[in-house]
């Protein structure tokens, strides 16, 4: 069992080391006048699908647990909805409601933008 955990840990670390140069290149591209109207690169999509989305899904689960634990304090203060939006809905929206590879918060797919203008 420990050998399997070590293999999984090694795989995660290797994936992180492989994607590290992609993360560094994003800043240098932005400083050179990157055109944000272009779609994301394949590397950004891979990084988003393999690293960012699973982590934000885990953060949503941790936020849900924290939200439930704090309900006895937030319900009397009438802030349970606000805490739920910040700790659960926000990370879930960031995980599932943005195009693959788009790392900026607030970027939404075209079908969401079209439906919100109605």
Image (cartoon, rainbow, N blue to C red):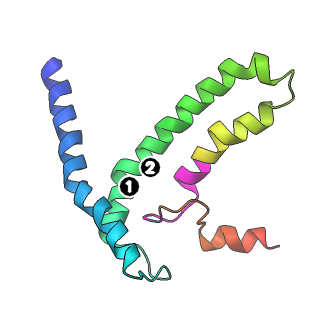
Q: Position of residue 62 (x, y in %)?
A: 54, 29
Q: Nearer the viewer, residue 22 or 116?
A: 22
Would residue 13 be counted in the magenta stretch? no
Number of numbered discs = 2
Which residue in the rendered view is the most extreme toward the front?
Answer: 31
Numbered mark located on residue 83 in the image: none
Q: Position of residue 74 (x, y in %)?
A: 79, 24
Q: Residue at x 32, y 71 (%)?
A: 28
Alpha carbons under labels 2 and 1: distance apart: 6 Å
Disc 2 packing (10 Å; few <14; some 14–19; many ≥20): some
Q: Residue at x 51, y 65 (%)?
A: 99
Residue of label 2:
53
Residue of label 1:
49
Q: Residue at x 16, y 27 (%)?
A: 6
Left or right of 10, for residue 87: right
Quadrant the C terminus occupies: bottom right
What SS does tag 2 mark? helix
Which residue in the rendered view is the most extreme toward the left?
Answer: 3
Q: Position of residue 55 (x, y in %)?
A: 43, 42
Q: Which residues are magenta?
A: 92-102
Left or right of 93, for residue 5: left
Q: Are marks 2 and 1 in contact (CB under 8 Å)?
A: yes
Quadrant the N terminus occupies: top left
């Amino acid at each position: 069992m420990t050998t399997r955990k070590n293999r999984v840990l090694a795989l995660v670390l290797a994936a992180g080391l492989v994607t590290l140069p992609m993360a560094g290149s994003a800043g240098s591209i932005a400083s050179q006048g990157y055109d944000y109207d272009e779609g994301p690169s394949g590397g950004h999509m891979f990084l988003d699908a393999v690293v960012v989305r699973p982590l934000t899904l885990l953060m949503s689960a941790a936020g849900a647990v924290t939200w439930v634990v704090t309900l006895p304090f937030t319900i009397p203060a009438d802030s349970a909805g606000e805490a739920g939006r910040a700790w659960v809905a926000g990370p879930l929206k960031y995980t599932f409601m943005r195009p693959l590879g788009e790392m900026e918060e607030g970027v939404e797919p075209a079908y969401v933008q079209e439906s919100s203008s109605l």
